[in-house]
Image: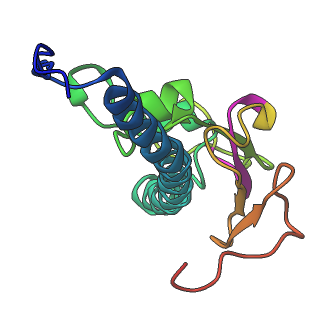
Amino acid sequence: MNSNVVPRERAAGFSLIELLIVVAIILVIVAIAIPNLLQSRMAANETSAAYTMRTLHTAFVTYSTTYQNGYPPILDTLAPGPGNITTCNTAGLVEPMLAVNHIKGGYVYTYTPGPALPVSGVGCAAPGVTTFTLNTDPGPNGSERGRVGRKSFYMDDTGIIRFNMIAPAGPNDAPIPAGG
């Protein structure tokens, strides 16, 4: 054995291989976590959209009983007025972003009024309607399906919320199960 050979000292810190292994482990964890996060976000958006449909139905019934003018002639009628003064024309029953812009949580709400009443209620600028339908889709016409959410929802004056996973929902689609 050669006694003139000096042993090499190990440098402090991590080797390149050790750093690459740590980075690879982090990438695997991220690859598993991101799809779950996106699925959770879509499920939350869908739940929020269904809950908002229920809230809107309550606002429609409240409008009808408060102002004796049927259901609102347009969704904008449910927004608050200037100074938050509530009237038949600015009922203040729904947040402005939803009532005026018809969008919430990436879902677009489409209110279709039915036949108008023969006369408007006292103080109302326009007569209310006897029936309505309300659709909500992930993005305009479902264009964000799979990114914002998968389900589209439909409701009419019966208050039953129906859903469809691949197209805009309608009156013949399955209702949301009780408790779901």
Q: Which residues are magenta?
A: 128-140
Q: Is residue 75 above or below residue 100?
A: below
* Residue 108: quarter of image: top right
Q: Position of residue 86 (x, y in %)?
A: 30, 37
Quadrant of image for the C terminus: bottom right
Residue 14 in view in this figure: yes
Residue drawn at (72%, 48%) of the image: 135
Q: Nearer the viewer, residue 118 or 21?
A: 21
Q: Position of residue 60 (x, y in %)?
A: 52, 55
Residue drawn at (45%, 58%) of the image: 55
* Residue 106: quarter of image: top right
Question: Which residue occupies the extreme front position in the image?
Answer: 1
Residue drawn at (39%, 38%) of the image: 26
Residue 124 in view in this figure: no
Q: Nearer the viewer, residue 180 or 8?
A: 8
The number of callouts visible is 0
Q: Is residue 94 left or right of residue 85?
A: right
Q: Is residue 157 above or below residue 30?
A: below
Q: Position of residue 22 (x, y in %)?
A: 34, 36
Q: Nearer the viewer, residue 2 or 113?
A: 2
Q: Is residue 12 above or below residue 123?
A: above
